[in-house]
Image (tube, rainbow, N blue to C red):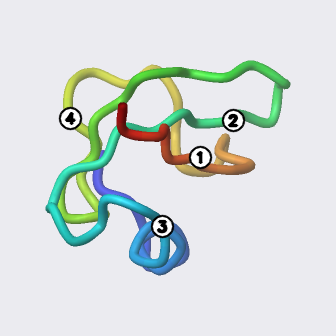
Amino acid sequence: MRLSQKWVGKLLNLPGAGTGCQTIDVVLKNGSTVEHLIVLRCQDILGTVRFSEDDIVDIIVEPDF
């Protein structure tokens, strides 16, 4: 899934943007959270996602350990 500029702009200002790869949690309108997704270049969520961008309320970058 390719994210719109709204989310790209947010991810660019969060940790990991400089590495080209971030691990994120996506908070959805229905109150659920999809955890441990990988996003490349702040715009491409890898793998199969079962939600649309319209379902996203927030994106949280997971801390690196």
Q: In which quarter of the view is residue 16 placed?
A: bottom left
* Picture coordinates of residue 27, whole percent (x, y): 69, 35
Q: Quadrant of the C terminus?
A: top left
* Residue 13 vertical position relative to residue 22 in the rendered view, above or below: below
Q: CA distance from mark 4 to mark 3?
A: 18 Å
Q: Quadrant of the N terminus?
A: top left
Q: Nearer the viewer, residue 64 or 13?
A: 64
* Residue 35 in the figure: left or right of residue 46: right
Q: Which residue is mark 3?
A: 14
Q: Nearer the viewer, residue 53 or 63?
A: 63
Q: Amino acid at mark 1?
A: Ile
Q: Earlier in the sequence, mark 4 or mark 2?
A: 2
User: Which numbered disc covers residue 27?
Assistant: 2
Q: Residue at x 51, y 21 (%)?
A: 35
Q: Which residue is mark 1?
A: 60
Q: Which residue is mark 4?
A: 46
* Residue 43 vertical position relative to residue 5 in the rendered view, above or below: above
Q: Amino acid at mark 3?
A: Leu
Q: Earlier in the sequence, mark 4 or mark 3?
A: 3
Q: Earlier in the sequence, mark 1 or mark 4?
A: 4
Q: CA distance from mark 2 to mark 1?
A: 8 Å
* Picture coordinates of residue 23, whole percent (x, y): 35, 38
CB of mark 4 within 8 Å of CB of mark 2? Answer: no
